[in-house]
Image (tube, rainbow, N blue to C red):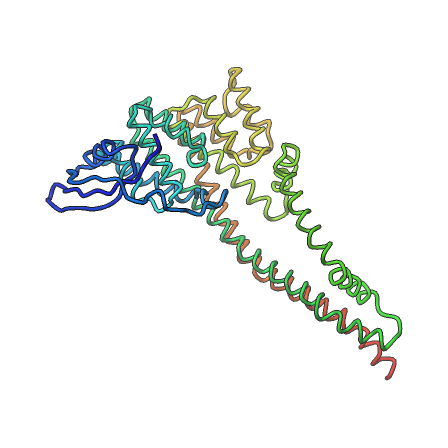
């Protein structure tokens, strides 16, 4: 049955009357939901003209769920469960107060599934866009072990750490992206409007032009004369590249390139090791079996090269090897990581060692990003100066030659 919107009036334990709206499959379901929230329904009616409401739905944009929203939901959910609130009441409260409409809709669907007797992990599993494999596996392990509150707290900690790291890297990349975009716009503007003025000037003056000026004028002629080809071709190139990196061979080559990039490759590598360590550590502490944990780590690694290495290690572990031994055969894992895991296996504290490795590499990424930010600023300013200055020099070289001839 399709859900409808109901208006309600209800009195809380202190006697205060509240009014609002609630979505439900029937009036009885809304009355039940209000009672679970600890309020006494006074009036519940279907909202009139609810079917006339229209919403603009943009696929891929309006239904997009941000990692930060899921992180905030997880922390609030963990806090409520740990405080002793029931599962249904916690979901009901979060459904109302979540600012993200797509996530609120999903929470409502999860709540209704739980009301029908579906397990929380199974209800979450129906919504992979919001709750991935890592999320549902941890919740399932928490349900099985009777420690859902502790599991949710660990999950919230892990998600907040991942969001903070991702935000740090994006903030560091924002400045160079803006500067390079400005440089590109300046160069295109000069090619379209400034260079053609000098082309007419030098054509009337006659004489042979220097090589840099010829190259610049040739580029300007292409941009001004064939913009209707250059523009679509550039768009097709970007589209084709994005399609290519979404194919298995393209993703492998692209991920390998990111790891080997000068300067930035180190950040990508350290981020991948941090994600591997933190994810595996959280899963093992939660009680997820090692082979299932390795499979989840492979899926959420974010890098095909790292994922392949994890899959190979999982095969060795399945055959009876320790975790540290097969890690040694993969250069993607630094020796420090291997040694720390080996010590953890000897002492029975692999999860603690993995947490220490993740903390170490998180700090390494933060320090590297800070250093890159300080270094990139003067380098980008110099690049902008050299680019614009080079164009101006190429434009004025013929004038310098004319002055020398006259002199």
Exactly how many numbered labels are in the figure? 0
Q: Can you give x and y, in whole percent of width and height, for residue 301 in the image? A: 52, 34
| Quarter the C terminus occupies | bottom right
- Name the outermost residue toward the top: 319
- Image position of 13 with respect to 399: above or below: above
- Image position of 328 with respect to 191: above or below: above
The quarter of the picture where residue 175 lies is bottom right
- Foreground pick, 3 / 387: 3
Q: Can you give x and y, in whole percent of width and height, for residue 343 in the image? A: 45, 27
Q: Is residue 12 left or right of residue 312?
A: left
| Quarter the N terminus occupies | top left
The quarter of the picture where residue 335 lies is top right
- Foreground pick, 271 / 117: 117
Q: Is residue 84 left or right of residue 378?
A: left
- Foreground pick, 151 / 238: 238
- Name the outermost residue toward the left: 15
Q: Residue at x 29, y 35 (%)?
A: 24
- Foreground pick, 196 / 80: 196
Q: Can you give x and y, in whole percent of width and height, for residue 101 in the image? A: 38, 44
The quarter of the picture where residue 12 lies is top left
- Image position of 266 with respect to 392: above or below: above
- Name the outermost residue toward the bottom: 407
Q: Is residue 155 left or right of residue 309?
A: left
Q: Residue at x 24, y 45 (%)?
A: 20
């Amino acid at each position: 049955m399709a859900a409808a919107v109901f208006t309600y009036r209800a009195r809380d334990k202190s006697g205060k009357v509240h009014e609002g709206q609630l979505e439900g499959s029937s009036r009885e379901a809304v009355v039940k939901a209000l009672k679970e929230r600890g309020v006494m329904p006074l009036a519940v009616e279907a909202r009139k003209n609810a079917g006339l409401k229209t919403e603009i739905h943009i696929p891929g944009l309006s239904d997009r769920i941000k990692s930060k929203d899921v992180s905030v939901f997880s922390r609030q959910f963990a806090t409520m469960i740990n405080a002793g609130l029931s599962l249904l009441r916690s979901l009901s409260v979060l459904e109302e107060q979540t600012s993200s409409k797509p996530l609120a809709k999903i929470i409502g669907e999860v709540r209704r599934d739980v009301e029908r007797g579906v397990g929380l992990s199974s209800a979450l599993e129906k919504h992979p866009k919001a709750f991935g494999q890592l999320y549902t596996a941890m919740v399932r392990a928490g349900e099985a072990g009777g420690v859902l509150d502790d599991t949710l707290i660990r999950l919230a900690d892990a998600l907040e750490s991942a969001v903070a790291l991702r935000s740090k890297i994006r903030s560091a990349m924002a400045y160079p992206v803006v500067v390079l975009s400005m440089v590109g716009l300046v160069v295109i503007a000069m090619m379209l409007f400034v260079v053609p003025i000098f082309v007419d000037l030098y054509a009337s003056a006659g004489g042979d032009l220097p090589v840099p000026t010829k190259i610049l004028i040739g580029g300007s002629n292409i941009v001004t004369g064939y913009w209707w080809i250059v523009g679509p071709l550039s768009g097709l190139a970007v589209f084709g590249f994005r399609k290519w990196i979404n194919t298995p061979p393209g993703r492998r080559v692209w991920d390998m390139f990111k790891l080997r990039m000068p300067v930035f490759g180190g950040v990508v590598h350290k981020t991948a090791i941090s994600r591997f360590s933190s994810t595996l550590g959280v899963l093992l502490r939660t009680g997820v079996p090692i082979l299932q944990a390795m499979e989840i780590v492979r899926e959420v690694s974010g890098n095909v090269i790292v994922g392949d290495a994890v899959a190979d290690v999982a095969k060795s572990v399945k055959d009876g090897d320790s975790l540290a031994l097969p890690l040694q055969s993969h250069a993607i894992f630094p020796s420090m990581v291997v040694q720390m895991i080996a010590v953890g296996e000897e002492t029975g504290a692999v999860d603690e060692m993995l947490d220490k490795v993740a903390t170490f590499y998180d700090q390494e990424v933060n320090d590297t990003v800070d250093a890159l930010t300080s270094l990139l600023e003067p380098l980008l300013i110099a690049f902008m100066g050299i680019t614009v200055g080079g164009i101006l020099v190429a434009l004025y070289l013929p004038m310098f030659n004319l002055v020398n001839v006259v002199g």
